[in-house]
Image: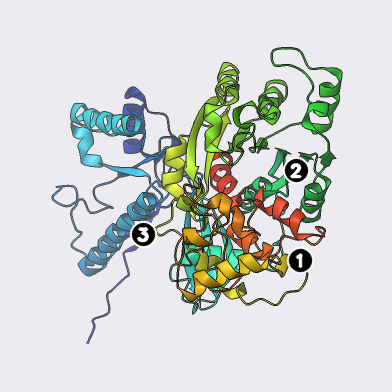
Amino acid sequence: MIKKVEIKTTPERSKLMARVRQSSTAIELAVREIVQECGGDFETNVANLPGRPDLVNRREMWAIFVHGCFWHAHEGCKRATIPKRNREFWMKKFSDNKDRDLKKTKRLKQLDYSVLVVWECELEDKKKLKKKIFNFLSRQKSTGKHDYAFPRQEFSFSSENTVKRVVYLRDGRKITTQIQCNKENSNVDDPHSAFDYAFLRKKRAPQSPRSSQVVRGVDLFCSCGGLSLGAVEACRALGKEFLTVAAVDNDPVLLEVYKKNFPKSKTYEECIETLIDGDIGNPPTKKEQSFLKKLGRIDLLLAGPPCQGHSHLNNHKKKNDSRNELYKKVARLVEIANPQHVIIENVPAIVNSNSKEVQESSKLMRELNYNVDSDVVNLATIGVPQNRKRHIVVASTSKQLEIKKVIKKYSVDHKRAVRWAIDDIEKEAANGCFTTPSQLSEDNMMRIKHLHNNDLYELPNNIRPDCHKNGHTYPAVYGRIRYNESSPTITCGFLSPGQGRYVHSTQMRTLTPHEAARLQFFPDYIDFSSVETRAKLSRAIGNAVPMKLSYVFCLELLG
């Protein structure tokens, strides 16, 4: 039989407990003074962090609790006595206090805060305590381990058919997004994979949050909106709203797709040179002044300049393609508009361009006091079911990101395979050009049948076209996709087996535009219905940027 603990105290004891100060106690004030002497900046009694720490530095991610030895039952301390009256009550109270303290510390550490506890009795030797505090603060400044602590996202199953994403912000808030999923599906064995799996299969676009925090973005060379989609989803994860104040592209087919999917955006069917016609280093021209007036404040500049001039598949012009100079127009807009954050993507080969547009653009942004980093990223690392390498430049006036650290933070445990992305639509009924594969020649159908009937993934040399025999440059051409691996890079040629490894793994055909869109990380709610032919669809989808790229960097820049 469990004995019920007596919880009553004397009136005198109740009055004494009521007079105990909860904040700004004498020992807290003494510890604050020591922290200031050690060069520490802090806030006090931060209510929206676990346990309401007595001293907090959110930028350096540390918290200090100042504990009275009696109330927090400091073990081995002469001040931590147990009153003789109602001893069982006090023992339970002290035990509960210690449990609460442990939980507070654990929750803060889960948010990547370093935690220090200062006991009342330690003030008896202020010199020793000052050394302890100084060493604690020095570790936080020297390691830099908290640079990428926030925002932090976690995924979990909240029910049989629901998975949620929780994004923890530096100020202690958390933003939760829930999505319906089929947990029984064999491809969704972990919650992060389940969330992305369900996201790709969403038929209706989620509503943008109503927020007072509106991120104003510009998307140059916007195509059908892959970069903007990542920014929209990152803002949703952060409880913000994304508004495109200018989406610029000279391809009316691609721009129509953008308009359908981002109806609040302002679009410009223009060559970028007509809007940004000045040279770097010169004052804004009249056209540029007019464009800037329409834009207003720019929080985020996204850009995917044409990459065909740098692509290894462009054997004719390669590094001397005139489109290569368009990259510098992005730097020109940075110079005259001063956006807070910038993300530019292109193919890895751009760093070897004769015109050195990456190097010159990065140099200019550094001279304009931007923090700049650049690197090559394989998007399969962050969850795109495709081995797609891209060169990224990230610049910011307020954040200093290292691309390698961002990619490491958001890397997935297991790369997603083709099967994960498209297994539910491999036998989808043909209903318009979006869900219909291309019509192939008899020779190409013979080659596809040979691959499937012999369980091959590489086409034998003897049945290749003459131009691909004996030392052909691209061995993956006419190849069959491996279902349990990430796909090869999706290009505009995904409809043809002669353009790459685009023969379906289980079906005797090439990919459909719908399957290619999934592999490019376009969810099903993205509307491509304005595109009337498969050839135009292949251009829209193949030239796009998977939204995961801008999503992870926008989380860091905007969080």
Which residue type does callout 3 highlight?
A: Ser
Q: Which mark is residue 14?
A: 3
Which residue type does callout 1 highlight?
A: Cys
Name which quarter of the figure residue 93 lies in.
bottom left
The image shows residue 19, relative to residue 365, as above or below, that is below
Q: Position of residue 245 (x, y in %)?
A: 78, 39
Q: Disc 1 or 3, which lies upstream in sequence? A: 3
Q: Position of residue 112 (x, y in %)?
A: 38, 47
Describe the element under mark 1 as helix, strand or loop: helix
Query: Are circles 3 and 2 on residues that touch, CB within 8 Å?
Result: no
Q: Which mark is residue 307?
A: none
Q: Disc 3 or 2, which lies upstream in sequence? A: 3
Residue for badge 2: 244
Point out the frontmost of discs 1 and 3. 1
In this view of the protein, which residue sits in the foreground, 532 or 69?
A: 532
Callout 2 environment at 10 Å: few (<14), some (14 to 19), or many (20+)? many
| CA–CA distance in space, label 1 to label 3 | 78 Å
| CA–CA distance in space, label 3 to label 2 | 60 Å
- Residue lying at 71% horizontally and 33% vertically, measured from the top left: 298
Callout 1 environment at 10 Å: few (<14), some (14 to 19), or many (20+)? some
- Residue lying at 50% horizontally and 54% vertically, measured from the top left: 476
| CA–CA distance in space, label 2 to label 1 | 29 Å
Which residue type does callout 2 highlight?
A: Thr
Query: Are circles 1 and 3 on residues that touch, CB within 8 Å?
Result: no
Describe the element under mark 2 as helix, strand or loop: strand
The image shows residue 242, relative to residue 89, as above or below, that is above
Residue for badge 1: 433
Name which quarter of the figure residue 530 lies in.
bottom right
Q: Disc 2 or 1, which lies upstream in sequence? A: 2
Q: Position of residue 316 (x, y in %)?
A: 64, 34
The image shows residue 449, relative to residue 359, as above or below, that is below
